[in-house]
């Protein structure tokens, strides 16, 4: 073992290696030196514990290069951003793991402008006095949705939390048992309600809830009637759910506010795109409901945000809640959301500027044409190292929206000849830029629906590199 310990290179030797010299042009010497010492200490500790740093340590012809490689790998998170660009070839339009909606060009320009200097985020330029950050988007939201007032927090769960905390803290909220949904990250409506201080009152059964169930549950302690739109799942078959119109009528009769959590709410009727019916925000507001909450980064196609619209008296109470400050949005979100909302102004024909809308609106004919073009590029890039074929399939909306919607698609299947599909997928994920597809039936599937302009060329280059890396490893 002492012989193996003596094989460890000295720190000065490592510093003089070309790979380390290249690192020193990117990072401070102190950072690189500390990592070299840490790696050497780890290897020395393994050897003293009668373990080898790697299997062929004893016979390795160039131990110095292996150590340098380890140092570089350990410093990779420092030399390369952790938040990286990913080419989404999965066909899932609102992919939560990939950041959901892609912003419109106008929203991106607005973010850059806001980030590049000072803004009037909370300054009324006409009076010179302090203003409200919500003023930048409230008039747009009320105009588009028909609501009396609006405000925005950092996501829809926060919006629900703020509403419940303001309107029902220490009191009862009645909700159908079939609507106690679980949202992203394993968070559930009952848990959000518990954090708000409201008391959950479940009514009805999982598959059937009648208006009389709500009526019987109302007590002097009742503060709110809540409907949660099951945007991320469906119960089908022997079912019955109380309509929002019925709840509104009951709320007015009992003197109770009615709140609707739409989740992945959107601002226009999507049936024109061949998608199934979902209640749009203006329709829900028009039903007479008092409060509506929905996300900004789902079907709306904007930044992450929790949007609250409804009656002014309730919105004003929420603005006075101390929790609002903890949940408020920053100037970048305000900028992106304002620009996105302008695309929805009445009479505007610019919805195609919103990538989410454009992807969902893609016709099968256009999808097929783009898939055929990409297949030709991938065939050339593969160079005989993988089979390329066109397959009929479907895309998904994603983001917990429209779970039953199937978007007809023409997919490109890639079947590597000299490595497994999982190895190819891993190589693509680790590339620059990273590429994500769908593994299915021993093929890696690519869907052009979610590719942005110019990404076909990058995807072809990434595939060629991923197949080349596999050869190098073998």
Image: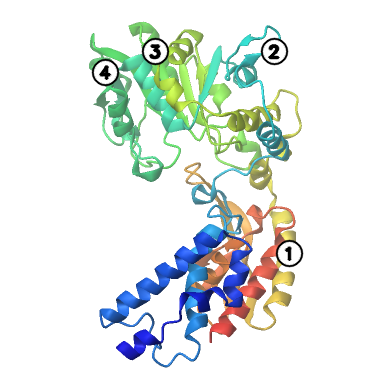
* Front of the two marks 1 and 4: 1
Q: Residue 108 appears in which quarter of the rendering? A: top right
Q: Residues within 10 Å of mark 4 (few under 14, many from 20)?
A: many
**Lateral position of residue 247 relative to residue 67, left or right:** left
Q: Which residue is mark 4?
A: 172
Q: Which mark is residue 419?
A: none
Q: Residues within 10 Å of mark 1 (few under 14, many from 20)?
A: few
Q: Residue 379 appears in which quarter of the rendering? A: bottom right
User: Residue 97 versus residue 114: which sits nearer the camera?
Assistant: 114
* Front of the two marks 4 and 2: 2
* Residue at 36 percent of width and 10 percent of height: 256
Closer to the chain start, of discs 2 and 1, is: 2
* Residue at 59 percent of width and 78 percent of height: 469
Q: Is mark 3 in CB contact (under 8 Å) with mark 1?
A: no
Vertical relation: 100 (above or below) 24 = above
Count of all numbered marks drawn on residues in the image: 4
* Residue at 41 percent of width and 26 percent of height: 160
Q: Residue 402 location in percent, x, y?
A: 50, 42
Q: Secondary structure at mark 2?
A: loop
Q: Secondary structure at mark 1?
A: helix
Closer to the chain start, of discs 4 and 3, is: 4
Q: Secondary structure at mark 3?
A: loop
* Front of the two marks 3 and 2: 2
């Amino acid at each position: 073992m002492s012989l193996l310990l003596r094989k460890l290179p000295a720190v000065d030797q490592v510093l003089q290696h070309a790979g380390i010299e290249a690192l020193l042009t990117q990072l401070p010497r102190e950072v690189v030196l500390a990592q070299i010492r840490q790696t050497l200490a780890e290897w020395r500790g393994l050897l003293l514990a009668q373990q080898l740093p790697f299997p062929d340590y004893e016979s390795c012809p160039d131990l110095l290069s292996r150590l340098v490689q380890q140092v570089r790998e350990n410093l990779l998170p420092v030399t390369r951003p952790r938040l990286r660009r990913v080419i989404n070839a999965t066909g899932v339009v609102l992919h939560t793991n990939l950041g959901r909606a892609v912003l419109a060009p106008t929203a991106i320009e607005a973010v850059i402008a806001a980030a590049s200097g000072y803004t009037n985020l909370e300054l009324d330029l006409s009076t010179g006095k302090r203003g409200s950050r919500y003023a930048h988007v409230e008039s747009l939201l009320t105009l588009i949705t028909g609501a009396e007032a609006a405000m925005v927090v950092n996501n829809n769960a926060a919006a629900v939390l703020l509403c419940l905390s303001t309107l029902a803290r220490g009191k009862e909220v009645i909700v159908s048992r079939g609507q106690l949904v679980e949202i992203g990250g394993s968070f559930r409506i009952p848990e959000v309600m518990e954090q708000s201080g409201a008391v959950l009152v479940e009514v009805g059964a999982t598959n059937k809830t009648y208006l009389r169930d709500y009526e019987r549950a109302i007590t002097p302690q009742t503060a709110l009637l809540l409907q949660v739109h099951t945007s991320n799942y469906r119960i089908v078959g022997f079912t019955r759910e109380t309509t929002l119109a019925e709840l509104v009528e009951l709320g007015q009769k009992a003197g109770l506010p009615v709140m609707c959590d739409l989740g992945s709410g959107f601002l226009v009727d999507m049936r024109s795109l061949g998608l199934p019916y979902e209640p749009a925000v203006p329709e829900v507001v028009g039903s007479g409901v008092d409060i509506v909450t929905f996300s900004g980064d789902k079907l709306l196609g904007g930044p992450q945000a929790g949007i609250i619209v409804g009656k002014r008296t309730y919105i004003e109470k929420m603005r006075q809640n101390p929790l609002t400050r903890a949940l408020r949005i920053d100037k970048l979100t305000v900028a992106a959301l304002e620009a996105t909302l302008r695309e929805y102004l009445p009479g505007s024909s610019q919805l195609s500027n919103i990538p989410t809308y454009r992807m969902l609106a893609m016709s099968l004919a256009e999808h097929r044409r783009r898939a055929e073009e990409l297949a030709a590029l991938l065939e050339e890039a593969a160079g005989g190292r993988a089979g390329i074929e066109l397959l009929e399939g479907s895309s998904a909306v994603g983001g917990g929206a429209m779970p039953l919607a199937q978007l007809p698609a023409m997919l490109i299947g890639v079947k590597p000849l000299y490595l497994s599909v999982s190895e190819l997928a891993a190589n693509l994920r680790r590339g620059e830029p990273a590429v994500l597809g769908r593994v299915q039936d021993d093929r890696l599937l690519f869907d052009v629906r979610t590719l942005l302009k110019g990404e076909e060329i990058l995807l072809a280059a990434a595939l060629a590199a991923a197949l080349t890396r596999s050869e190098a490893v073998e």
